Amino acid sequence: MRPFRQHSINCLWLIVLALVGQTHAQQPFIQKQASCPGGVITTMDQDNFGIILAGTRRGLYQFDGMGWEKIQLDTLDWGEVSVVKKDPSSVFWIGTGSGRLFYREEGEWKEEIPGDYVIESAITGLEFDGDSSMWISTYGAGIFLKQGDKITNLRGEQGIPDDQVYQIALDPKGRLWAATDAGLVCCFWNENNLLTKTYTNKDGLPDIITFAVSASPDGTIYTAGFEGGVSAYNADNERFTPLIPNWELGSVRAIVAQGDGRIYAGTESHGVCRIFNNHLSSFEPSERVTALLIDQEQNLWAAARGGDLYRAFTPIEILDIVKTRAQAIAASDNDLLWIGGTEGLYSFNPANNQFAKISFPFDMHIISLLKVGDTLWIGTFGEGLFLWNMQTKALVKIHTENGLPDNNVLSINLDKQGIWLATLGGVALVDRKTTMITSFKEVEGLPQSYIYQVLPDRRGGAWVATDGKGLFFLNKTKAIKSEELGDKTIYSVYQASNNDIWAATEDGELYKQGVEQFTKMETGSAAPFTGIEGDQNGNVFAIGKTACNWYQPSGGLALSFSEYHGLGPLERNLNASTIDQQGRIWVAAGEQILCVWPLKKKQRLAPSIQLKRVNILLESIGERDPLKLAYNENHLSFEYLSSWFQAPEAVTYRHRLVGYNMDWVQSLNTEAIYPKLTPGNYSFEVQAGVNGDFRHSETDSFNFKIHLPWWREPWFISAALISLGLLVWFILDVREKRLKKIAELEQEKITFQLETLRQQINPHFLFNSLNTLLDMVEEGHQKEAVIYIERLSDLFRNVLTHRHQTLISLSEEIALAKDFYQLQKHRFGAKLKISIDVPDTDYFVPPLTTQLLVENAIKHNEASRSMPLMIELFIENEEKLIVRNNLQERRTPASSTGTGLHNIKSRYKVLTSEVVEIIKDDSFFTVKVPLLKEHDAAL
Amino acid sequence: MRNRITILLGIISLGLFASWVHPDGEELPGTFITRTGNIALISEAPLEIIQANSPKLYGIVDLINKKFAFSVHVTSFEGFKSSLQRDHFREKFLESGRFPKATFQGKLITSELFNKPGTYAVRAKGTLDIHGVKKERIVNGTINLTREGIILDAALKIPLIDHDITIPTIVNQKIAKEIQITIQADMKKEKKKKP
């Protein structure tokens, strides 16, 4: 059934004629994808990132969809790789032709030495039962069972009838099946005892030479061998039954079960065969197939001669038909399809691709079909409706004369009330038994329009898709318009198994109504959709012009089939799809018929992504801790790879560096570079999507940290601040102390000056001096008197000169002291004796120190002619100036301010660390004054 | 004296052993040997048919342990249309200088006990060594067991590519990519040496 606008039927015909000329290139089921440089692949498996590992005579190779890479060990050549197998924890194992075992742990291959046995035969199979048990089959040494560190060799006596084991398979019940020349051996546990049973011809096997064995996820065991093809194990009677009797395709070397009933067999000389529902079909390459694999994307891989690797995308199959242009399709109970087209009705057996035309006395241009019980309801273009009983071959025609609103029946649907027809003249309901017709021409709210589809709702009522008038819900007597869809032309309306209503419009939109109103769905490039179908899990399949989309029950777009999968522009046949008992959706699209297999839960929906290499300053990061990068290791690049075998050209990437920029950057490159990163915590994230769609993408990430330079680390900054603080404090403290010292010194100086002045103008001193002077004048020693006066004036002048100085040279000081002595000499005469023995040195002392000490001595001691006061000044050890007098203290102590000695001590304390020593013993009073160098007085 | 006793004992024990192995001479299975088996090859190429055969097939078949071995000298093939053809066969294709012999040895895949005369269909699985390249093959054949011995018939097809035998493009049309081999051998029971 073909879409049209509100045009005349003639116009419709023009479209039909225009499309007749279109042809579609035949899409081969299986295509050569690559050729392994290592030669014939005998074993292969896929890792979690989609990379295929292939074992050949020349070693191990990996294939990422783009190219091959040989995996080599630095230390040795492992020769022929005869088994590649992934264990339950995704660790890869390989067995070699020389009986060695290797496994890959964190990217490194290591050799496994299985206990006490040296396996000298080629390893042909590896199976893993949980984490601890491993089965190893060999070609020549039977089977080994490794449980922890214990290894057992099963052969001969243990019931393995042949040491040459071709293949093994572990079924979900933990039984190991081994293909040998003497039949299929089953090893199973019976209360900790390992038993074996060999299945041979007696158990239904067509040939005791069994080459291949495979355990389907559902537990079915398939085996095949030299002759007789593939057999399946029936657990009820413990027998094998050949799936295809009279097998003519020779030896089978590999079997793989898809889990949906499809079994693929790799044959010795007839390529890949598919067995489904006991039907056999054979595909290219028509040569020896050595290994088979179904990957996470549901691609079937077949390894053939010369290392060639063939791929077939299995979720969708495209069948080319030339007999008719199919416009309607209906599935039958017995795997037969009914196909209606421009030339009439055909039966089609997809198992053997057989077409058979059903002859009718009428020409029928069929645009809709529905099978109800034994009756096939046939909607035609212009000829009304036909009811054909498939058993009795009776044909009934229903026409406008029988009450049909119009003779163009675009869709036929069934519910309890009867058969709903969409015609170019409106909606009609036909009673299944009586074929009584109820026309819905005059229903309130339902406009006059061409009707494209009438979909009975399982909850009651029916949805009516109109041409240019929108979507209506017909409820007995009233039609309610779905306002969200406005006046659009509705091509198709579908009720999913979860009762959601899906509607496709002519302008390329797809709507879903969950609980309340219709919301728009993502369509990608597939729109406009001309039909919607779905499975019992609520997944919905929308058939578009250029692509078909699988939607998840939530409405999310799961998988899109497009030109990459061999889909050309499809003929726009409205609602020309059906679902068969196996859950396969069939689409009639002119010269092609699409077969869509049920969407698998484990189907990979987006390309894998894997960071392959991280570089710092263009060098691989290697073993380095990425959280410990130095501040100048700030140029990072990331190399990643993905696999998406079904459409490698459609893969796009996006990446971001969390910590740098949260926005995703899309690109086609498989490398991202970040130069000049500032210190900080980062996380690189990368995803791979299909044509910019990242909804199902996985993320691979890499965390790293660039550290601050040491001088910007917080600990360093705080330490530096603390030290600086301490330094400032210290400087201030020193300065403070020095200022204090200066102040003290100043104070001392003033006090000293005061004291000295006070001493000099001491009334006693003056009185004594003046008395002495008077004596001189009276006795007529005029000259002496003048000298005395001069000396007195000199003394006063010197005192006044030096009192502001901190230090004076020792010689000056001694000169002062001499002056003072001369003055005193006049007064005391022989009562006072002073000896000065101070050489001329460059030492310094605080000024007037000696004078003060001499004066002190005179002041506190008696002096008489018989006991003269002896004062000595001399230098001790070139360190100290000693002022010593013989001790003859006055009986009446002189009035003393007591400041003299104290003042000297204080002044010295400020100037130097050396102390002024005052020693008083029985006979002497000694003061030791340290001699200073000039720089000591830097203050 | 001591020597004589030893010899006597030896003779007695050998006699006993022989009579145990052959209690009444009626035991059918055993080891069969031929040195004059027939092996023929036919190559049916579009332009030329090459035929040759050798009557010097050496073979041994052990029906008890179900093992066999056959061997033939490449140079023993005769009956070519021309000596040129023969020389090509020997030197160019099979390189008889480097690989003088072709052998096939392995096991018989059958559950038969061969305890009465008759014709048995058997399959022989073994390693076929031609042109220095070993390939595992399973060959269908029949064994006609009589009191006198066995007559063995077998046929197999050998793709030349399997054994790294490359044909110059120029003679592509003259040599088939697959060569058919037929074997016919009249084999006698291995004779026991007199003690």
Image (tube, rainbow, N blue to C red):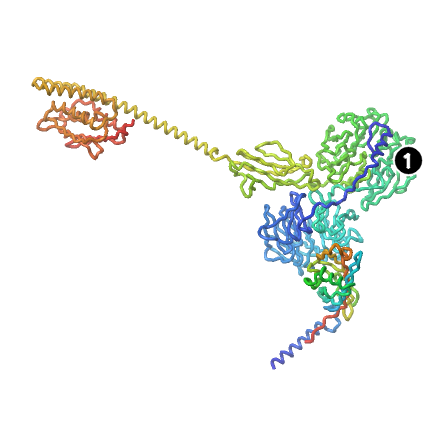
Residue A626 position in % (x across, y down): 54, 39
Residue B87 position in % (x across, y down): 73, 63
Viewer-proximal residue among B162 and A409: B162
Mark 1: amino acid: Lys
Q: Is residue A143 above or below residue A870?
A: below
Q: Residue furthest bottom?
A: B1
Residue B19 position in % (x across, y down): 71, 74
Q: Residue furthest left?
A: A779
- The residue carrying pointer 1 sits among few (fewer than 14), some (14 to 19) or many (20 or more) residues within 10 Å by Cα, namely some
Pointer 1 chain: A
Viewer-proximal residue among A103 and A555: A103
Figure quadrant of the C terminus of chain A: top left
Residue A774 position in % (x across, y down): 10, 17
Where, by quadrant of the figure, is residue A861 drawn? top left
Q: Is residue A534 visible?
A: yes
Q: Which residue is mark 1?
A: A397
Q: Is residue A238 visible?
A: no
Where, by quadrant of the figure, is residue A614 drawn? top right
Figure quadrant of the N terminus of chain A: top right
Secondary structure found at label 1: strand
Number of disc labels: 1
Q: Is residue A351 above or below residue A407?
A: below
A720 vs A515, left or right, is left
Q: Is residue A747 above or below residue A349?
A: above
